[in-house]
């Protein structure tokens, strides 16, 4: 299974990749903004994406990506407001993680979104 | 909403969020040493004596201003090291990036808490400033609130500049 991790912070990507590796997921693609994510999302099975990023933000990426794919998307962001969560869900996000978070929560999201 | 209430809410929300962020992401215990307000209304060269690295993020919308989180090199390396489960010996790209992401999470968490009270604003992408004893100038006509913290990784502080519209 291939996971796409999208965040403009290299440290945040490392935190997510480390947690995924520890959970046995080693096929990981990284992107630093929504534009890169669109280019690298070809054959991935699940996406974890940040919201606030330069070039193309996560919400715009989700809206674009949803025009052609139904694979699960989890938003991992500091935007924890009701309004934002609702907007993201309406735009096609399947699940939501608010920063700060315990990195292992991402493994639970994979479990619940991809039935084994 | 009165200015006083806004500031009190804001200070407590930033203190609470800072503790949450560092405890959750870096496994670090953080204690608040309180806050002080510095009125920079008439002083356009009101500088802050800083330590080695500052993460800065601007906000706009209902309120305009910026959030700054300042650490010594040692403290920054310990916190970012805690986030990644590793040790740093120099302030490399990851330490700078990590400090940027810390201010992003602190400002973002405080934004969520303030939003629930009807104070809405948008956040910019974080930036990082480095250099020993670097100084940052407060924008003109702004109120400055400084919050001091103590931690196992050393002392650090957060400042919020509120533009007086
Ligand atoms: Mg970001």
Image (cartoon, rainbow, N blue to C red):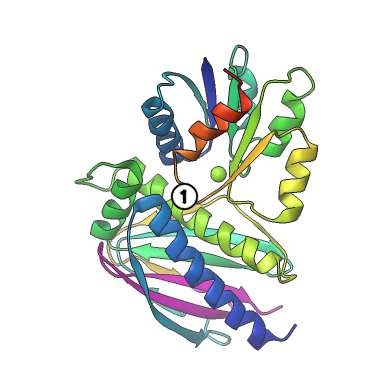
Depth check: give the residue in front, A4 or B164.
Answer: A4
Please provide percent x and percent y for residue A1.
Answer: 52, 14
Please provide percent x and percent y for residue A65.
Answer: 72, 24
Residue with the most extreme top position: A43
Q: Residue at x 57, y 17 (%)?
A: A116
A53 falls in the magenta region: no
Determine whether the beta carbon of the residue marked 1 sits less than 8 angstroms from the nearest atom of ligand 1.
Answer: yes
In the image, residue A76 sits, relative to residue A64, either above or below, namely below
Q: Residue at x 31, y 56 (%)?
A: B76
Q: Residue at x 35, y 47 (%)?
A: B83
In the image, residue A113 sits, relative to residue B145, either above or below, namely above
Element marked by disc 1: helix
- Going by the image, does A114 lie left or right of A86? left
Q: Which residue is mark 1?
A: B101
In the image, residue B38 sits, relative to residue A61, either above or below, namely below
Q: Quadrant of ligand 1?
A: top right
Q: Residue at x 76, y 53 (%)?
A: A83
Displayed quadrant of residue B158:
bottom left
- Going by the image, does A35 lie left or right of A18? right
Taken as a whole, is the magenta stretch helix, strand or loop? strand
Asked whether residue B15 is in view, the answer is yes
């Amino acid at each position: 299974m291939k996971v796409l991790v999208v965040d403009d912070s290299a440290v945040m990507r490392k935190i997510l990749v480390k947690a995924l590796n520890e959970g046995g997921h080693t096929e990981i693609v990284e992107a630093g903004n929504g534009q890169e994510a669109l280019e690298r999302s070809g054959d991935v099975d699940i996406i974890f994406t940040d919201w606030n990023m330069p070039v193309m933000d996560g919400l715009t990426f989700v809206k674009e990506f949803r025009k052609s794919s139904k694979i699960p998307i989890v938003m991992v962001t500091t935007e924890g407001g009701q309004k934002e969560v609702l907007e993201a869900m309406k735009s096609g996000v399947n699940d939501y993680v608010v920063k700060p978070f315990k990195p292992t929560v991402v493994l639970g999201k994979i479990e619940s979104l991809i039935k084994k | 909403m009165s200015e006083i209430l806004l500031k009190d809410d804001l200070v407590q929300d930033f203190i609470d969020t800072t503790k949450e962020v560092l405890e959750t992401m870096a496994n670090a215990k953080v204690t608040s040493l309180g806050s002080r307000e510095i009125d920079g209304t008439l002083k356009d060269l009101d500088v802050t004596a800083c330590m080695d690295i500052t993460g800065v993020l601007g906000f706009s919308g209902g309120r305009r201003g910026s959030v700054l989180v300042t650490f010594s090199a040692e403290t920054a390396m310990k916190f970012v090291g805690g986030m990644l489960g590793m040790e740093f010996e120099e302030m490399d790209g990851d330490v700078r990036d990590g400090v940027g992401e810390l201010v992003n999470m602190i400002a973002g968490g405080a934004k969520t808490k303030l939003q629930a009270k009807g104070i809405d604003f948008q956040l910019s992408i974080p930036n990082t400033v480095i250099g020993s004893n670097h100084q940052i100038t407060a924008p003109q006509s702004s109120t400055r609130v400084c919050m001091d913290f103590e931690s196992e990784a050393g002392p650090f502080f957060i400042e919020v500049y509120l533009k007086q519209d």
